[in-house]
Every structure is written in structure tokens, then in C-alpha cells.
Amino acid sequence: MKIGYFPGCSLHSTGREFNESLRLFAPAIGLELEEIKDWNCCGATSAHATNHLLSIALPARSLALAEEQGMSEVLAPCAACYSRLRTASVELRENPSLQKEVSEVLERPIAATAEVRSISEVLSRMTADIRGAVVQPLAGLKLACYYGCLLVRPPKIASFEDSEMPTSLEGIVSACGAEAVHWDRKLDCCGGGMSLSRTGSVIRLGRSIVSDAQKAGAHAIVVACPMCHSNLDFRQRAMLKGQEGEVVPVLYITQIVGLALGLEPEKLGLRRHFVKTAPFIQRITTVPATAQEA
């Protein structure tokens, strides 16, 4: 399956493990990523809070480039990038006058014909391919799938699945042989947009997410957003200060798939996380034979 690829800024910086792990296992499941040439920042998370036209024009330029390069679908792995590109696409289609204005600003035509897809949507389409490529089943592992704010909301924009009861990440985790735990905080906000301005609120919000994952018996939290990963990984020790329970590693869904496909943890970027992933990796390599067979 060939698809246009919009990595976005985070996947080249703080979230580069997301990009590296996806690119590493993509060939094994038949996923061909064609990066949009000359793509630009989508404006997340500040543009839409300051200037509506700018918030549409920034992602629209990359969408216009995708059209020019013959792409009918574009994968945006970062949940924030996905939200901004998909929002621009929907608004441009529904508002001809806005489409004309943006086209004039960009000095290029834009029809918003390229469908923007999230990482959960693309990988959930390929669960059979993932299952067939697994060489290290993650049997015996319990994972808390965390969607956060932007992967499935608002419903009008992220219309791929039920915004109140999404299951795409759970399906991918299951294809890898692991168990997705039932927990209550998988749609809660981690406070990503307030990471620097209201750190105290971010710590409070994150504490409830991590604590709930602990109570559910999760060995790791699975995310599809660099900002969510940064908050829950980097600030977790502050979140759990004075609390009972062990820290919970936070992994990208692409790292989970990569591990199931037998790729080296080092190459998947698992050594760079703030919450140590070594105990989690050790669980994979010490799963009893009976669990592997199951």
C-alpha cells in the first residue's frame, strides 16, 4: 500500500522515535511511504489560536503539494498534525470562499482532494499484514491504549471511528499479540497545549492518566501523539511524586509494532525515553513458551 507521508516537525525532533520506528517496519508490512516534497509546519498548536486564515493556509499548502504530487491519501502520524491537516481539508471542501481565499494566499490551486489519514486508521487497515509479519508475539503483555484529544475528536473532523469508544489502537495491539486493558482515561486530555504555560495542570492531568493505567495493570501506555508522549514520559516522575506504584513506560504504537516484528529496541528509539523501557523489553524476551503459543 502506497500513501503520501507528512511527518511534521515533531517527528524530526522530540518525537523522532515515532518517525524512525514507522519507517523501520513499514516495508515488512507492505506500507510504502512517499514523503510530501517541501512540506511545511502545519501550525499546531498555536496558529489556530491566533489566526484562523493562517491555521488553514499552513496545512493547506502541504495538502496542495500532495495534490500536485499525485497523492490521493496522506498519512499524518502526529495526532496534532493529523487534526490540523484534516480540519483544513474539511473546511476547504465545505467553504468555497475560504478555498478561494487560501488559494490566493498560497498562489497555487487547492482542491483538498487528498484524504488525510491518522496512524491508527492506516495501521488498523493493515492488521492482517501486521499479524502475518509478527515474529516476536507480545503475548502476556498488557497495554493501555491512549487516544488523547485529537486522534478521534472532534467527531466531524476525525470521523474514522467512534469518538467515545474508539478501538483502532486496541486492534493493532491485539494483532501484535498483546492484551489491551480496559481503563477509564484513554480519552482524557494530558494538557499538551499547556505544557509550558500551566505545568502544574499538566502534572495533575497526567497523574490521573498514569494512575489509571497502573490500576488497570498495564505494563506500558501506548500513544500516537508526540506531545502526549512528551508529557507522559518526561513529566511522569513529577506526576507520581509521593504516589504509590511504579512508573509506566510510554511507547508509540509504531514502537509496539516494531517490537512485535522483531526489530531491535535500540533502532526503534526505546533507549531514549525518560521512563526506562528496559524492564518492559525484558518482559517480551522472557514470556513463557505457553504464552507465546497462545
Image (cartoon, rainbow, N blue to C red):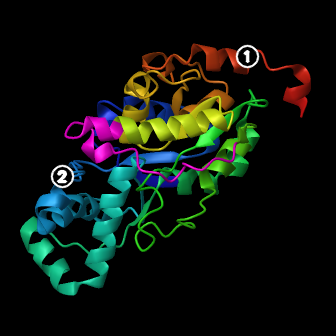
Name which residue type carries label 2: Ser
Q: Which residue is mark 1?
A: 285
Q: What's drawn in magenta, residue-wise?
A: 181-202
Q: Is residue 252 visible?
A: no
**Secondary structure that dominates the magenta span:** loop
Q: Find disc 2 in the rendering and name its residue.
A: 46
Q: Position of residue 84 (x, y in %)?
A: 30, 59
Comes first in the chain, label 1 or label 2: 2
Q: Is residue 287 left or right of residue 87?
A: right
Q: Left or right: where does residue 276 sit relative to residue 40?
A: right
**Residue 127 visible (yes or no):** yes
> On screen, 44 above or below 131?
below
Percent x, y of residue 32: 50, 46
Instruction: Give the SS element for disc 2.
Output: loop
Q: Residues within 10 Å of mark 1 (few under 14, many from 20)?
A: few
User: Label 1 sits on what residue type?
Assistant: Thr
Instruction: Tell me which residue sits at (57%, 67%) in the image.
Output: 162
79 or 39: nearer the viewer? 79
| The quarter of the displayed image where residue 111 is located | bottom left
* Image coordinates for residue 278, horizontal then vertical, percent: 58, 14
Front-lying residue, 269 or 262: 269
Spatial CA distance of label 1 from label 2 is: 42 Å
